[in-house]
Image: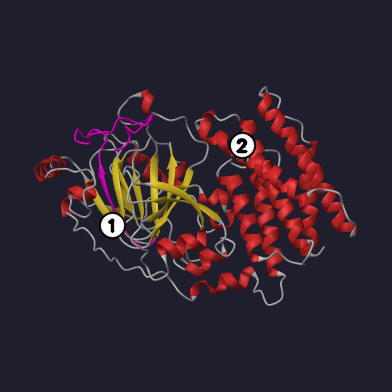
Amino acid sequence: MAPRDEVLSWYRAATETLISAPPAKDDRDPESAAVNVLLQRQAKALLVIHDALGDSSPHQVNESLLTRRLSDVVSISASKFYAYRFDLLPCQWRQIHTDALILSTHHDVLCSLGQNAWLGDAVLDGVVEKLDRAVITAGGAGVLGTAWVEKTLRLLEDLCDALPGEPPAAKRAKRAHDAHFALGEPYGRPALSPDRTCPARSGWSLAAFERYMNGDTSPRPVVFTDLVAAWPALTSRPWKSPCYLLSRTFGGRRLVPVEIGRSYVDPDWGQELVPFGAFLSSYVSPEGGGGEEVGYLAQHDLFSQIPSLRGDICTPDFCWSSVPMHPADDPARNKAPVDVPLVNAWFGPARTITPLHTDAYHNLLVQVVGTKYVRLYPPWSKAMRPRGEEDGVDMSNTSSLDVGVLEGWDEDAQGMTEEEREAAKSELESEEYWECVLGEGDTLLIPMGWWHYVRSLSVSFSVSFWWN
């Protein structure tokens, strides 16, 4: 089957599935039920248009009204994401949002492929954006789910590869070695204290790691230099290549969440969903430095969203070890056990930071591209000054101390006096702490409960593995 016909057949089958899917059993909300009925009508109208395209016959569907109704359903369901805390959002609204975006892309595809054998760039950009929004915003809820979205994107890439003069994805990926990010450290690097530098280790077995984690004393941070040497992301499929990353993100079209601003505790901090290519050109750039505004792809489950990148890394064996719970001996601090490690991406230019905070998981932080400075304080430190509740959000896992400001690396956005700054810095210096600069291929163990501050020294791509 030709790529064009395969895309059309795939979309028709999906729309039929949405029409035949039974309503959620626990949906007692009359508003969502009514919106779902409206969405079903649009799906049936889409099938009429689809079949008329195949027969080259006219249809009686008002496409302008169809477009408006689909847009209305997307807007109505999106408004519910602001009306509820995400974990309390009724599932049917996430499902309606996903289904409406999928049906909207079906109409976009029909409009374009009805006139051509390919999708224009503007149409393709819009389709990819809507499908990624369904995954990122709504979690791909619904009967089709994220697996359907991922296969659709692969089919669309195949369609693009079939265009005359368009190099296939495999050839685009091979160009990955042509250029790398400039990995200089434009703002310098902190001088490490020899007696506070994290020890570097290699050659540890899983049994040796478990003995260390479960010893008589609480584990301290350690840098492992040999856990990920065979990762394709470091060798044959290099993430330090902008071309390679663009080839794995549909030419940079894939949407990613980006934090805008220096730190998530700053008043001017915000978040945006932007195409990966726009993120590179606006904030990272192949030349190694973004603009004045800082953009950070932080703590994002990129590898579930884009599985093609997941194949470039492997979960370290240490993540399957038996490990202790929170050292504070407070059951309230422990999270429910995770079946598999939680894997997140951290990618941005020099000067991106994660403020001093603590997590309820053990963490293996792997440095794939560039360099990163990390400072760590133990859970029993008395100098962390945890934040309280802010705008209804519990921020007690984040310190009110800004390490970058105290060290003079960043401008003070909090208005501390010189005396206050020196007093806080002196208090921190009297505490036990460890620090390191991670280079490519290094893996830092951050034991559960340890406070840590992270600062990119160059263009930096890291992967964290949380487990308990």
Who's the residue at 54% across and 35% down the image? 81
On screen, 332 above or below 426? above
Tally of marks: 2
Q: Position of residue 387 (x, y in %)?
A: 28, 33
The residue nearer to you, when weighing 207 against 283, is 283
Front tag of 1 and 2: 2
- In the picture, the disc for residue 401 is none
Decide whether residue 269 is among the magenta residues: no
Say which residue label 2 marks.
77
Instruction: Say which label, 1 or 2, has the lower sequence index.
Output: 2
Rendered image coloring scheme:
secondary structure
Type of secondary structure dominating the magenta stretch: loop
Provide residue 105's location: percent of width, then percent of height. Answer: 69, 52
Q: Amino acid at mark 1?
A: Val
Residue 363 falls in image quadrant:
top left
Q: Residues within 10 Å of mark 2 (few under 14, many from 20)?
A: many
Task: Relative to 168, say whether 33 is above or below.
Answer: above
On the rendered image, what quadrant is the C terminus found in? Answer: top left
In the rendered structure, the answer to whether residue 52 lies left or right of residue 173 reads right
Question: Which quadrant, please, contains the N terminus?
Answer: bottom right
> What is the secondary structure assignment of the residue under circle 1?
strand
The image quarter in which residue 91 lies = top right
Q: Is residue 379 left or right of residue 229?
A: left
**Can residue 290 be seen in the rendering of this structure?**
yes
Q: Residues within 10 Å of mark 1 (few under 14, many from 20)?
A: many
Q: Amino acid at mark 2?
A: Ser
Q: Give the residue at x 76% y 46%.
A: 14
Residue positioned 51% across, 53% down in the render: 256
Does the magenta segment cover residue 384?
A: yes
Bounds of the magenta segment: 369-398
Q: Give the vertical position of 27 relative to 68 (above or below).
A: above
Residue highlighted by disc 1: 437
